[in-house]
Image (cartoon, rainbow, N blue to C red):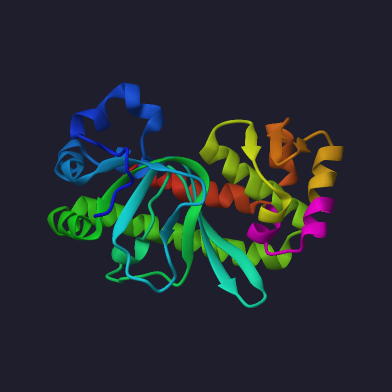
Amino acid sequence: MQIDHGATAFSASALADPGERQQSNMLLDALPPEDLARLAPALERVPLPLGKDIYEANVPITEVYFPTSGIVSMVSSMAEGTVEVGTVGREGMTGIALVLHGESMPTRAFVQVEGSALCIGTEALRRALGESPVLTRLLLRYALALFDQAAQSAACNRLHSLESRCAKWLLMTHDRVEQDVLPLKQKFLAEMLGVHRPAVTVAAGALQHAGIIQYTRGKLRIIDRRALERASCDCYETTRRSFEALRTIE
């Protein structure tokens, strides 16, 4: 497994330490102690620098990341441009194809917002899945939540206004970053929403004019979270509930 320089070994005791709670991963948090202890020796804490490639489209995945902070974006690139098809924060993991007995993903994944993650090699993850029915059930449920997110996004892109879609995207990013100031360029936001930059300028401008956000020089500040929720479509709440359900394993 190739790990970035500066990575440190991670133990089960460190993962369970309450002092690490806000820098943990929700999927790993949901595991019973015995399953987490079995998995922990294979995990290493690594940085997620901005722009880091997590995997390329249709290339075998060699490691899986469980983000503890930051955001990984999954994008589909075509001749007409690049569109975001999903995001992964501390509620999830990258490389879900491995859980479904696949080798690669049809999308490219890269770090959208810098942070850190717990990284595990694909073979170690496969062994852990073979040893832990609970881990397997949890990650399969996450796969379903991720597919639900993609389906919801497809419907959202067809039926809802760009302003409400923009609000939804900002809410999801805010949840994962857990800070009010987001490093964000309009060109990047346009690519993530699959529209031209002038359209994003209008949508973001409407939210700013309403006093919900403040945007300047590549940084966006969320001023009124509740108003942003009202400006969003129902898809945000639907997706949020889907991932929240992963906190408890039945």
Residue 173's quadrant in the figure? Answer: top right
Which residue is found at the position 75% from the left and 39% from the top?
A: 217
For the magenta stretch, what is the residue range? 189-202
Position of residue 102 in the picture relative to residue 192 (left or right): left
Between residue 154 and residue 170, name the one nearer to us: 170
Residue 103: give x, y in percent of width and height: 30, 71
* Vertical arrangement, residue 29 with respect to residue 1, above or below: above
42 part of magenta stretch? no
Which residue is found at the position 49% from the left and 61% from the top?
A: 148
Query: Looking at the image, can residue 82 be seen?
Result: yes
Q: Looking at the rendering, in which quadrant would you find the N terminus?
A: bottom left
Residue 186: give x, y in percent of width and height: 73, 51
Position of residue 143 in the picture relative to residue 83 (left or right): left
Query: Looking at the image, can residue 30 be seen?
Result: no
* Vertical arrangement, residue 46 with respect to residue 111, above or below: above
201 part of magenta stretch? yes
Which residue is found at the position 35% from the left and 70% from the top?
A: 104
